[in-house]
Every structure is written in structure tokens, then in C-alpha cells.
Amino acid sequence: MKKLSIFTAILLNNLLFACGFYPYGEDVRFHFLNPDSFGFQNYNMFYYSSASFGDTYFYGENKNSDGKNEEIWRKYCKNKVSAEDIHEVLMHFNINQINSDNSNSFIKYLFLTKDFEAINYLKFAKSCEFFNTWVDDPWERNEKTVIVNRENIINKAILFSENVKSLELRKRYSFLAIRMMFYNNDFKGINRLYNQNYAVEKQDGIIDVWALYFKAIAEQDPALSNIYFAKVFAECPEKRFVSWQYFKSKIPKQEVLKKTKNKAEKSNVLMVYGLYNSGKDLENLKQIYINNPSSEGLSFLLSREINKLEDWVFTPYYTLFDPSMISPYYSDKKIDESESVKTVLQRSESDRKYASEVLQFINSVDLSKVKNPDFWRFAKAELLFMSRKYDESLAQISQLEKSVSGNSKMLENIEQIKALNLLATQKKDGAFISESVKNIILKYKNNRRFVFACGRELEYLGNTDDAAILYASFDKPYSENDYQNFNYVYYKSLKNKKLTYEDYFTDAFNYIDAIYSPEQVSDFIKKAQSLESKTDEFSRYFKLNKSSIQSFYDLLATKYLRQNKLDFALYNFKKLGADFYENQYSAWERNSRNSYFGSVYFDQNPFYQLKYTPDFISEKEAFKLNKISITEKLIEYISKAENPNEKDRDYYYFLVANSYYNMSQFGNVWMMKRYFKGSRNFSVREDDEEFNASKLAAKYYEKAFQYAKTDKFKALCLRMMGRCENNRLDYLYEQNEQYFYKDSLYTEKRLAKNKYYQKLMKEYPKDYENLMSNCDFFESYFKARR
């Protein structure tokens, strides 16, 4: 229900913002510790994950059998038959296949040794299979028949158990009876038969544990039931998930612990309670260690604690998203979705302190007593990294590399933490990618989240060039396997503000477009070009192709244009040449890209035509429209407008104003400053206000007004200034999160606040109605300029 509520909230939020999707949960969770690498596969359904019951796409699916039944039968056969043949009989044979002619080594052995007790048991067990499950019969046609048949089989099983010589087969028959009693809801019978054949205090093998599972279900005392389920969980991987489901976690832990009889039972109970705890579990780990330091479950719970800390520390630190599951350090506080990413980072820092506490616990542990000591050493290395004790972490890793040199899976985890340590330990503004780090990055180059984390470490230390080189390697199509394994990255920037059109990034180009300064883009291009002449494997893999470098040159020029540094913009546009822009953006060639957000080619002259407005200015000059020609013409017209000797200064100021208006989100050449456009265009780009509020256009319309010679042209200039002012007022209104609350009253208020419309009404009352009611009048007013 909790997950449903979260999903519903996210869905509603996305519908409101017309996006349909927003990253959360496993989409953003960062982790480097893979429990599979340390032998915890039998706990895979309990790996830390925001997905229900673990992330089976990443960690793989649980096996149907843990092999213990096959192991017992193999021992029964004096190890003379293969486990594979035993598995085949148990899982796939029917009753008719159990005969003396069968070539299966298990069946052959039983017939050769004339073990008819075992043969008869196998046949009987196969005859029970249909009844060892719930029978769903909505019409209730066979329900009573099934119950009666089960009762007959139960009686037979009990009778056979009393007459066989083998103690093991006696328990097997009793277990079959107990299991069918469960499906018949005969809990009294379960307790009776269990007490006759088994003992909680004395578990001789896996059959006893299977029987205990049903005893736990039938137990009336909830505390004792939990103790039994915890024991089954500890000893039978095959029954772990269902035991966890039946375990009554809402019963106070201390109430259950009071009824435990030994340290092993205490450890088992603490283990399952730990699995229900998605928050800090350190005190529980300490208690398990006191009671049973060699517990496999203790090591696994520690791996969960590391995965939690990775989520609480690394997810915010590298992506600036909230953790996939919120840390309890602030779970009692109201979480506001609009909190800045700086607050998210502050939370991450608080959780680093908890990492230090877990590290202190590991330092207090006697590693000779724990299960899987190499894992504990790795945990220590990663916690040292989380605690920013980089040199100590690297020293721990150096020791680990020697002891686990043959374990490629474990080395994968170790080497990734090593690379991050080596990057993070460098000084601000002096960071670089060393050869050893390059080798590790190359080795795991397909792990996008690891490579991104390396880039983030570099970026935080001021090396935006190398960071961008790493980010750019992600700008490739994702495979189905990438999606299944969450091998993609969503991330934010410290520059993110509320109400941005898209407050996260998925690729390098859009990130650099939004965040990098022109100087940073220029340096990045030089870095990318420097890789072209290098022949080492790292440079060959991470170098950009010609098309990508051209795109970044275009971005550099576009950034200068956003800053209104027209000469710098034109210089860089010209580096690419007119052919590049005609192929990319020109309507003359008609082979342009078609953006999801609309056409990106130039099909209207920004100096003479306005979007959604009838043409009212005659074109004096016709030229091919592209980024170079428009920038050139803008520089030319500004020069003419600012020339004191130019008699048509008002005319050229008006054309300049038109072009700036058309380079905003409301214009016909918005692609001069953006690479996509949606219904809401707030962003962290440097010209966000200009793109949405048309301030430069207003400035130049006002210049045209100052040099106008006629009242009609002045009135037209005021009308255009008022259009820009409306955009500015809308921008301010929507910045205050009132985007969805516009109505007729808002329109009236905006009109009253629009100083240019008010001036038009006051000083040119005869022209006000014409210009405000119909754009068709614009032509006559423009022609009245002289």
C-alpha cells in the first residue's frame, strides 16, 4: 500500500507537469557493492532495493531449490549417484517413470540395492503432488472431494511412517502428512504430528526444518511462531521468502527475544527483524555479533547496511536526487519536493557520519570469527571512502587486492571504489585522470553509473573537461539490457531551480548546454580535440567523433549568443561554415531534423515576420536563413541603428527588436538559442529570463519609440513593448509557482500592471482599440512611420 501511495503521488505530479515520467527509486539509486560478488545469492530477494522484494533484474532470480534435498538423498545413496539425476527425479519425474527399466542413476541404484522402502516412498510422494497445493475451484465442484482425498493420503502417510525401518523415511512420510494437513487447514493435526516425530530443540536435518515451517504456521503463540520462522529462515534458503512473509514484524522485538532459549535463536530473530528495517540497523548488527559472530546472516545484513548508505550518501552526492528510499535521519521531518539540491547534499553529509559509526563497529569486530572476512574488509574500505578517509581506504584496498586476486567479481567492486578514491583524494583545481584510474575506467566502461561517478568526482574538483569527456561517452543508444540493469543515469545540477522545464539531465550535451560556461565549453572542445591525435586505448574509446565536436562548436557559439556577445558568437558559427547550418537548420534545403518539440529549421525571417502575427513589414533584403546569416544581419542592423548619421534609426531598432523577440520562446527562430522547446521553458541556462521575458526585444522597441517620427509608429512600438511586458509579467507570475492559476481576473490584473499598455491607452487613446483588438492594423501603423 505504501508503494502504491508513492506511485500514485508521483503519477499525479507527472500528470500535472505534463511530463508523464520523473526518475525515482531504482532509476536514480547509486551503489557499487553487488552482494552477488560476495556470495549472498541465497538472500537475493532481500537485497536492499526500492523495488518490491529486491531488484531481481539486477541481481538475478532466486533458484527453485537450494540443493539440500538432493544432498540428503545423495548421502542416503552413499554418494554413488549424481545430484543432477536426483534433482531430475525429484523435480521432473512422474510416478510411472520410477521403474527398474529407467536409466537414471538414482532410480537404478535404489532398484539394484533393492531399497523398496525408498522406491515406495518416492512413488507415494509423486502421488501426493497434486494435493500439495491449494486447489482453486470457484464453482466448488471438487473441493470436498480433494479434502477427503487428502485425509485418506494423510492417514496412509502416517501409517507408512509407523511401519518403515528408516528414521529418515519415517520423517519424510510424516512431513508429507503435515504438509497436506496445512492445505486442509488442520492446524491441530500439524501440532500433534509434529510433536510425535520432531523436536524444535533438536533439528537433525533439512526435513526437520521443513516440518518446523508448518509448525510455525500452526503455532498459536505469535512470539514462538516468530522464533520458529526465524530458525527456518536461517537454515533453509528455499523457505526464506515465505518465512519472512509469515514473520509477524509488528510484535515488539524484545517480546520475542524474551522467549528465545539460546544465542542462536536470538541471532536468528534479530536477523529477520533486521530485514524489516529499511533504516539504520547498526544496533541490531551489534547484537547479532554478540550472540553469533559467525552468522552468515550478520554478514548479509552488513551488506544491506552498506547498500543503504550508498543510497543515502552516493545517490544525492552524485545525482542530487533524493535517495531511492529516504534515510531515517530525516524521515521524521516533512520532505518538501521543492527543497533545493543543496539541502539534499546536506542530508548526504549527515549520513556520512552514520557511515563512520558503522566503520567503528567493523573496527571493533574480530574478523577471525565472522563469516566471509574479505567482505568485511571490503565494507571497511568502502566506509572509509564514504567517510572521506581516502588514504586509509586505499591502504585497505591494497591489502584486499592481494587476498582476492583470483575473484574477478569481488575485484570489480574493489577496483571501482579504488578509482573513486584515487580521484577524490586529489586537490581542488588539480585533479586529473591518472593512468591507473584510466585502466579501471576502461575495464568497466560499460557501467555508466560508475563512469558517471568518476566524472562527478572530477567535476567537483574543478576538472570539467575530463568530466565532460566521460559524460559524453553515455550519448549512445541504450540496449534492452541497459534498461533491465538500470545502466543509465539521471542527474541534476547545483544550478537547478524550481519550475525548470526539465530539472534533470540524461545526456552530456544537454547538461553541458545548460550548465557549462562558454569558457568551459571552449576548454572542453580543446580537450576533446586533443584526444584525436592520441593512440592509447583510453583516448581511442573516449574521443568524440567529428559530428559531436561540430555540435559542441555550435553550442559554444549559441552560448555566446545567449550572453549577447554577438561577435564571439559569429566567429564560432563561422568556424562550422554555412553548409553545416544549411544542412542542419535551413528551410531552403528542406532536409532538416524534425524535433519532437517542433520544427527546427528556419522558415520565417526573424527581422520582418512575427509568429502568430500577419506580415506587416515588406522585406527589403532576402537572404538564406541560418545561424550565421541571422547573426551577421543582427550585427549589421544594430550598427546602423546606433549610427547617429542613419536617418532610419527607428526602422532598424524595430527590426533588431523583432529579431530578439523571435529568438525568445515566442518567436520563429527560438532555435538560435535553444535545442528544444516545450510548453514550459524555464531552465538553468544563463539567459532563462531573456528567453521567457523578451527583455532585449522590449529594450530595442523602446529605442525605436525614442527615434520614431510619427505618433502612429510610436503607438505601434508601445504595442510591441506591451507584448514583451506581458511575457515578463507571465514569467514572474510563473516563477512564483502560479502557472496553473491563470484566469480572467489574472488577465485583467496583468493589463493593469502593463505600463506600456497603460501608456498606450493614456497617450494614444484613438489607436489603443485598433492595436489591441486586431493585429491586422499593424501594417498601416508601420507604413505610417514616415
Image (cartoon, rainbow, N blue to C red):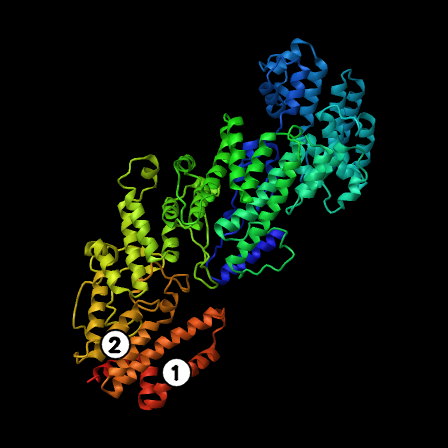
Relative height, residue 671 to residue 721 (above, below)? above
Assign a secondary structure to mark 1.
helix
Assign a secondary structure to mark 2.
helix
User: Label 2, label 1: how many angstroms apart (C-alpha)?
Assistant: 19 Å
User: What is the quadrant of the C terminus in the image?
Assistant: bottom left
Horizontally, residue 565 falls left or right of residue 356, namely left
Question: In which image quadrant can residue 638 be found?
Answer: bottom left
**Residue drawn at point x = 17 percent, y = 78 percent:** 646
Question: In which image quadrant can residue 148 be found?
Answer: top right
Give the number of the disc on residue 654.
2
- Of residues 75 and 464, the one drawn nearer to the viewer in this rendering: 464
Question: Which kind of residue does numbered mark 1 sit on?
Answer: Lys
Relative height, residue 518 to residue 377 (above, below)? below
**Residue drawn at point x = 59 percent, y = 59 percent:** 335
Residue 165, image x and y in percent? 78, 15
Question: Which kind of residue does numbered mark 2 sit on?
Answer: Phe
Which residue carries the number 1 mark?
755
